[in-house]
Image (cartoon, rainbow, N blue to C red):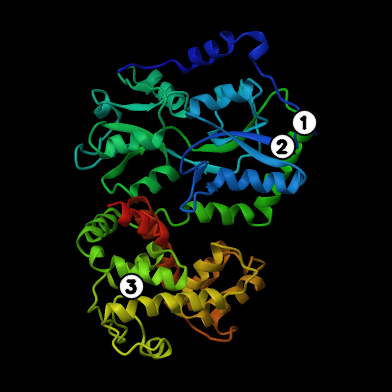
Amino acid sequence: MRSISIALFCICFIGCKPADEVDKAPAIDPNKKEIVFVTHNGPSTYYLNNDNQPAGIEYDLASLFVKTYFPDHEVRFLLVNSISDVIPSLLKGKAHIAAANLSVTHLRKHLVIFSTPYQETQQQLIFNNEVNKKPKDISDIFDKKISVPEGTSYEEHLAALQKKYSLLKWHSAKRTNTESLLEEVADGLLDFTVADSHLAALMQNYHPNLDVAMPIGTADKIAWAMSKNSDPQLIAKINTFFSKIKKDGTLRNLLDRYYGHNKRLNSLDVTTFLKRTNSLLPKYIHLFKQAQDITGIDWRLLAAVSYRESHWDTYNTSPTNVRGLMMLTEGTADLMGVTDRLDPKQSIPAGAKYLLKLIDTVPERIPEPDRTYMALASYNIGYAHVEDARVLAKRLGLNPDSWADVKKTLVLLKNPEYYTTLKYGYASGGAPVIFVESVRSYQRILEKHQPSHNPELDKFRIARN
């Protein structure tokens, strides 16, 4: 293991570049009609979703920015191998903007201009609680194997700590990312790594043995970066953009979409779920896929709903006589033509069709995934109460078409100050919020471990075998 002087790294980075390669800010070419963003693959930046389409909060932000301020331009992403390549690529003039979950640090400010920050995060020291004990203080990690990706702000925070604790050592891993190092910690190959709090919370949903040892440094701001030679008008537009989306709730909605559910499950929840995906899910997986064929709803979302409702126990019955894998009420069962709620062959397709009915009931103007989130809340508490929450959101100056805002007003439905003024009255509005966020977490876990269902592709695979 070795330590790195970040200050020396910064000086070398600037001093070793030929003069004609440093800080080239490309002009926005009116002929090419494109704005280029440099980023790297990762759950907190840019990735391909289940439909093989680009996703990620940086992708969404960049796309919205270009659509708003350069409507006749295309957005193009330059994907680099790791975060250590992001700023060098920017300074070589390969991109107009770096959108890569970059923390605003003192040393980086010497290299680039940062936009108005759009998110705050806390760097955390992460360990495997099955392999190591939680350190009582910093001295407990002096002899441990610690690694962080090269070129990250984590190095800068560790270097600051090292000035106070000279025995602190770590290794800077080249050509890797934080997610890979977190997986090494989860697999027992590495004692500790450092991660932003929002990324650590996300990865804990996949690896319940990951735990937080201690915070590292003070909270960081995350922002876009531009060359110091960038067009001042571009910088002004970016800052105006972030101010606008903070004010109108767009940013809040995006942050909720990607991170709002991350801390809903604890390690026992995740461990139990992973065990039951191996022991119970195989019994019903074909029924969930058949339900997808009928409704078009991803089978992993349906399986997540079922697990949250019944833990995949087909005989599950609540004190209010809600029963079966999809926990159907008697009224819903009658509506969907179910004669035996304890029969998985009836319960699963009925629950899927009922969820589809709720999605179709939610106003079409509400975009996905918010529309599905509101349908899920309706599955739990009833559509009428969700409509009350939307009415209340509008009264309070929030966005009734945004799940991030509606979930705030759902929890107010138990307060007489509010529910007495609404059409459908009292409701335990915290329950559907917990339900939706838990389902979202379970779905993300299934998406990581279970392949999507494509009937035509599945037929091809069977034919080949």
Q: Quadrant of residue 325?
A: bottom left
Three-letter amino acid code of the residue under disc 3? Glu
Q: Which residue is mark 1?
A: 29
Q: Are marks 1 and 2 in contact (CB under 8 Å)?
A: yes
As measured in the structure, the alpha-carbon distance from the residue carrying label 2 to the one carrying label 3 is: 47 Å
Q: State the SS at label 3.
A: helix
Three-letter amino acid code of the residue under disc 2? Glu
Three-letter amino acid code of the residue under disc 1? Asp
Q: Which residue is mark 3?
A: 309
Q: Quadrant of residue 371?
A: bottom right
Give x and y (percent) for residue 307. Answer: 31, 67
As measured in the structure, the alpha-carbon distance from the residue carrying label 1 to the one carrying label 2 is: 7 Å
In the depicted structure, whether residue 397 falls above or below residue 176: below
Give x and y (percent) for residue 274. Answer: 26, 56
As measured in the structure, the alpha-carbon distance from the residue carrying label 3 to the one carrying label 1 is: 54 Å
Q: Which residue is mark 2?
A: 34
Give x and y (percent) for residue 260. Answer: 47, 56
**Residue at 58% across, 13% down:** 14
Numbered circles on residues, count: 3
Q: Is residue 433 left or right of residue 89?
A: left
Viewport quadrant of the N terminus: top left
Classify 10 Å Cα crowding around label 1: few (below 14), some (14-19), many (20 and above): few
Give the mark nearer the N terminus: 2 vs 3.
Answer: 2
Classify 10 Å Cα crowding around label 3: few (below 14), some (14-19), many (20 and above): many
Can residue 413 be seen in this snapshot?
Answer: no
Classify 10 Å Cα crowding around label 2: few (below 14), some (14-19), many (20 and above): some
**Residue at 43% across, 63% down:** 298
Q: State the SS at label 2.
A: strand
**Residue at 48% across, 29% down:** 81
Q: State the SS at label 1.
A: loop
